[in-house]
Image: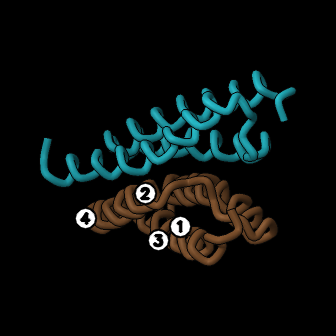
Chain colours: A cyan, B brown
Amino acid sequence: MDFIEALGLVAGICTSSSLVPQLITTIKKKKASEVSTVMFIVLLTGNALWVYYGFDKKDIPIISTNLFTIGLNIAMLTLKYKYKNNE
Amino acid sequence: MDFIEALGLVAGICTSSSLVPQLITTIKKKKASEVSTVMFIVLLTGNALWVYYGFDKKDIPIISTNLFTIGLNIAMLTLKYKYKNNE
């Protein structure tokens, strides 16, 4: 792995990890996220397109970051429906 | 602009635009975001590294998406301090 790829992975860790506290807060408060379902769909579409883009460019940092973000967003969407009645 | 670059830009618009409603909600409610300052710093660092990464790879979608996200995050951070006493 060269320097710039390592830097890309660090960038990905920084931007993805910023979603984790939101997930933890949602679990702790057992309260649905204020982010709308439509927005989650837009975000997931964006992440999926990034993954496709990453594969085309054979860009490991983009692929791994967006796959991780897709996982986090699906978790958030699941919690949003689980805690739907707690609003 | 070729197909894959256009697709990368659409991906960027999808992932960046998901931050806009959060900004609007913050402005409407005049209430500080629940996201911590430390997390904003981590996020901004991540975006800055992505911009560097994008320049190295001469990747327009990565550069433009992350510059736009940096703008949105600085706006959020500014509002967070402006509405600090409204918590």
Which label's residue is closer to the chain start, 2 or 3?
Answer: 2
Residue named by callout 3: B67
Badge 3 marks a residue whose secondary structure is helix
Image quadrant where residue B80 sits: bottom right
Residue drawn 64% across the image and 54% down it: B14
Provide the chain ID for the residue under circle 2: B
Q: Which chain is indicated by disc 1?
A: B
Quadrant of res B87: bottom right
Disc 2 vs disc 4: which is toward the camera?
2
Circle 4 residue: B56
> What chain is tagged by disc 3?
B
Q: Of label 2 and label 1, which has the lower sequence position?
A: 2
Q: Residue at x 46, y 64 (%)?
A: B66
Q: Amino acid at mark 1?
A: Asn
Q: Name the residue beneath numbered marker 1.
A: B73
Q: Amino acid at mark 3?
A: Leu
